[in-house]
Image: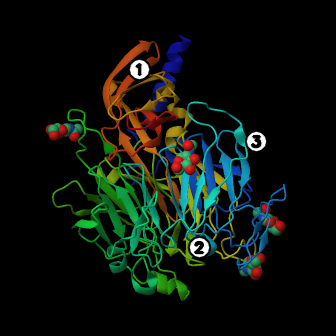
Amino acid sequence: MTTTIITLTSLSLLLLFHPLLTQSQPGRTNPPSPATQGQWRLLQSNLGISPMHMQLLHNNKVVMFDRTDSGRSNLTFSDGRCRFDPDDTQLQIDCTAHSVLYDVTTNKIRPLTIQTDTWCSSGAVLPNGTLLQTGGFHDGDHVVRMFTPRSSLLSYVDGDDNNNNDWVEYPDYLNRRRWYATNQILPDGRVIIVGGRRQYNYEFYPSDSKLYWLDFLRETRDGRNENNLYPFVHLLPDGNLFIFSNTRSILFDYDGNRVLTEFPEIPGGDPRNYPSSGSSVLLPLVENATAPSSIEVVEVMVCGGAPQGAVRSARAGEFARAISSCGRLRVSDRNPNWEMETMPLERVMGDMLLLPTGDVIVINGAGRGTAGWENGREPVTTPVIYRPSAPQIWRFSVMAASPTARMYHSSAILLGDGRILVGGSNPHVFYNFTGVLYPTELKLDAFSPPYLSPAYDPVRPRIVGVRAAAAVRGYGEEIRVSFCVTRYLTRSAVSVRIVAPSFTTHSFAMNQRMVVLRIVDVKQKASDMYTVTVVGPSTAEIAPPGYYMMFVVHAGIPSSCIWIKLQPR
Ligand SMILES: *[C@@H]1O[C@H](CO)[C@@H](O)[C@H](O)[C@H]1NC(C)=O
Ligand SMILES: *[C@@H]1O[C@H](CO)[C@@H](O)[C@H](O)[C@H]1NC(C)=O
Ligand SMILES: *[C@@H]1O[C@H](CO)[C@@H](O)[C@H](O)[C@H]1NC(C)=O
Ligand SMILES: *[C@@H]1O[C@H](CO)[C@@H](O)[C@H](O)[C@H]1NC(C)=O
């Protein structure tokens, strides 16, 4: 009797709140609850720094860093560590931290040491799990830095916060200064570093000592407005790069240094790159169920930004309304054309992130102005979630409002438990907490999308094991994942996805990608336990080597991830 009642209750909860059944419909407002609009939580009221760059590593720790030339941060080293920089314009002896390691599991912070300026730089995680960071400003603009996480998949050591692993810097490594450049991990494990302020070229890590020209970046520079910085770079399954700058985009063969195709200009003529910062994602790549190693549909999405001239007017104290349009370009089509859509809210400096469900969240940013010192107005505190494959009128839903304004120099990343970690916001040259419109933000927040609501617990899968969990995975190899779920629907409700964690800065999540894996079968093992067998990505062009978060999604509700490492055999 009791069992029956519980079953009915959870079933009716599902019917009431299930995202597949309750899309936000036009003219209808969802009852505001964590199950429909998600939930915000304060994790840290004083992180000590304002992290404009964030990267999750495979030991569930997040490397965060700011710039070093903003004067003192709010985190002083307790062990006498200091940075001596006679050329620093603010502080020549600086005993405060500008980088921290945040432990997602324990919610603890450890200060890290950077010696040279990391302002507006870029990064990528190497296939071996080490974070590669490139460039910055002043004394840091030619520097390459590495941070190696201590615990590995094979020997997971918890509480390694006592370890003293820290940044290692390699001065004068880069061929050119890289300030506002974009990084992308490549199929062979190299990293390409594209552009930067007045750099119409690219180079590689590890360096071959060469510089490669990319005139497209010069052509798309809009004078002093720029709008060609932090170009949106996505590695496509055919091995070429999609590069978007300002309003234009190309298919680029980086090895042959050739532009293969120029795509149509995004309609509307509005710039989308820094400082008119919109954002962009490569939509999930779905491995074909019947024809391995072919991805049928490859699609890039670009959302938000600021209109033509917005940079100039912001500098003059007039803050233009941000752009509400998004464009989707199916680059796998023979003659691709942008399909335009309208977000429920205008947004500049938003961050676009892929959720484990394959939906896209657009979070942070402002309703007016542009990126750059003091250039933004009207924080947009409500994220929106976009469902790429829903009927068009149901695609966008507006989430709960954050209590915190996240303006210029804020950032966001996906965590392994499905939350979105949000930090930063500092539109000032210094750390200013009073006497300014948008104080330097030291708070760290997490947004839990609706799928994390306990209302969905009956259908939530929980990964209980991966065959030889710690092992390295080759391409095209079978992976068996066991999961528990209280209320199993059907095989077609199950999917398995891998997500590359992003290096997020300045509204672009570099290296972010999702591959939906091919399912071989789903078998019931016990009353509430199932085993799904999937095939790893077909090629390194589809998923470059390295660490990925693997999620099981059931009925639109994701599990927490387990980390897998992809490595060519
Ligand atoms: C940061 O440090 C300054 C200077 O010590 C202090 O006035 C301020 O209250 C601190 N801010 C926060 C948010 O902790
Ligand atoms: C990964 O490779 C880099 C570059 O060769 C190296 O500096 C780093 O120590 C390696 N990390 C690990 C975990 O082996
Ligand atoms: C998989 O590929 C085959 C052959 O190219 C095609 O007919 C089929 O529609 C594809 N399926 C999906 C789900 O893309
Ligand atoms: C911001 O902080 C700097 C350095 O502490 C200070 O010189 C400046 O006056 C502050 N700006 C405002 C608007 O308070």
Query: Crowding near pointer 3: few (<14 within 10 Å), some, many (20+)?
Result: few
Q: Which of 102 and 139 is in front in this view?
A: 139
Earlier in the chain: of badge 1 and badge 2, it is 2
Mark before the other along the chain sequence, 3 or 2: 2
Residue shown at the point (49%, 63%) measured from the top left: 507
Q: Quadrant of the C terminus?
A: top left
**Which is nearer the N-term, disc 3 or disc 1?**
3
Task: State how many labels appear.
Answer: 3
Q: Which percent across, then down, holds residue 31? A: 51, 46
Crowdedness near tag 1: few (<14), some (14–19) or many (≥20) residues, C-alpha within 10 Å: many
Residue that badge 2 annotates:
137
User: CB atoms at circles 3 and 2 under 8 Å apart?
Assistant: no
Q: Helix, strand or loop at disc 3?
A: helix
The residue type indicated by label 3 comes to Asn
Helix, strand or loop at mark 2: loop
Q: How far apart are marks 3 and 1 (CA)?
A: 38 Å
Label 3 with label 1: CB-CB less than 8 Å: no
Q: Which amino acid does label 1 sit on?
A: Thr
Mark 3 — residue?
A: 162
- On screen, 47 above or below 142? above
- Residue 412 is situated, as x and y percent measured from the top left of the image, at 55, 55
In the rendered view, would you say 237 is above or below 484?
below
Q: Does the Cβ of the disc 2 residue fall within 8 Å of ligand 4?
A: no
Tag 2: residue type? Answer: Phe
Instruction: Report the front residue among 124 and 326.
Output: 124
**Where is residue 203 drawn, in percent x and y?**
42, 65
Q: Is residue 248 left or right of residue 231?
A: left
Q: Which residue corresponds to the image point at 46% horizontal and 70% vertical from the top-left?
A: 277
